[in-house]
Amino acid sequence: MVVLSQNVLLDFKPRFEKSVENLPISVVSRSTAIVNDAEYPVKFDFITETFVDYKKQVVTTNIIQIDGTIPGTIKIGALMVVPQHINITCEYEILSITNNELKALVQDENPMLLYSNWLLEAIENETLVLEVKTETGQYVDWPVGIKNAYFL
């Protein structure tokens, strides 16, 4: 494990921390919703927040808000999810940058592009679990695979 000097973290804070705060990201799930026998993508908007932990020497990005609409029905096994609006405030860790990664980021020629690529890749490789309402009024966990993500 490479221990970062305090200078690397101190260099990160003024150069990047404000740039990566509250980033709006739009995602499209792998699932589609059925509306009048046609399939529509299910889209969500995320807001992320990035923190620097000097003690642990890590930079962490969390999803702090998820907002979106399921425009039609989605079948999950024998259950049918109904159209609904979803707005969740959370603290879901999506990316953690430590040691060599952080050093590479600080030294990169285009660090925001590198960070952006890491963040979008982390989101696209994640499966979120959202609580959604079914046609019976029951709430179930829906694993949401992310097809693609992009910055708004």
Image (spheres, grey):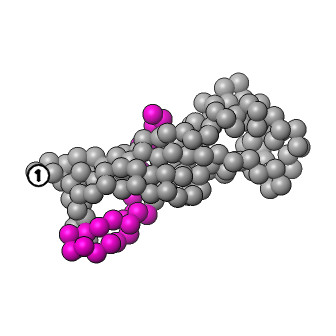
Most foreground residue, 57 or 133: 133
User: In the rendered image, which quarter is residue 16 located in?
Assistant: top right
At label 1, the amino acid type is Asp
Which quadrant: the C terminus? top left
Q: Is residue 50 left or right of residue 81?
A: right
The residue drawn where x is 38% and y is 66% is 131
Residue, x 59% and y 56% (percent of image)?
Answer: 93
In this rendering, the answer to whether 47 lies above or below 89 is above
Is 149 colored magenta in this rendering? yes
128 over 122 or under it: above or below: below
Does the magenta-highlighted stretch encompass residue 135?
Answer: yes
Classify residue 148 as left or right of residue 48.
Answer: left
Dividing the picture into quadrants, the one containing residue 20 is top right
Circle 1 Cα neighbour tier, 10 Å, few/some/many (<14 / 14–19 / ≥20): few
Instruction: Report the span colored magenta.
Output: 129-152
The residue located at (60%, 46%) in the rendering is: 49
Q: Is residue 17 visible?
A: yes
Residue bearing the label numbered 1: 37
- Nearest the eye: 120 or 12: 12
**Residue 65, x across and y down, in percent:** 49, 51
Task: Name the foreground residue: 64 vs 107.
Answer: 64
State the residue at coordinates (28%, 46%): 41
Front residue of 136/2: it is: 136
Whole-percent x, y for residue 29 in the image:
36, 50
Q: Is residue 127 at all visible to an observer of this figure? A: no
Split into 4 quadrants, where in the image is the N terminus? bottom right
Q: How far across and how far down the image is residue 143, in percent? A: 39, 63
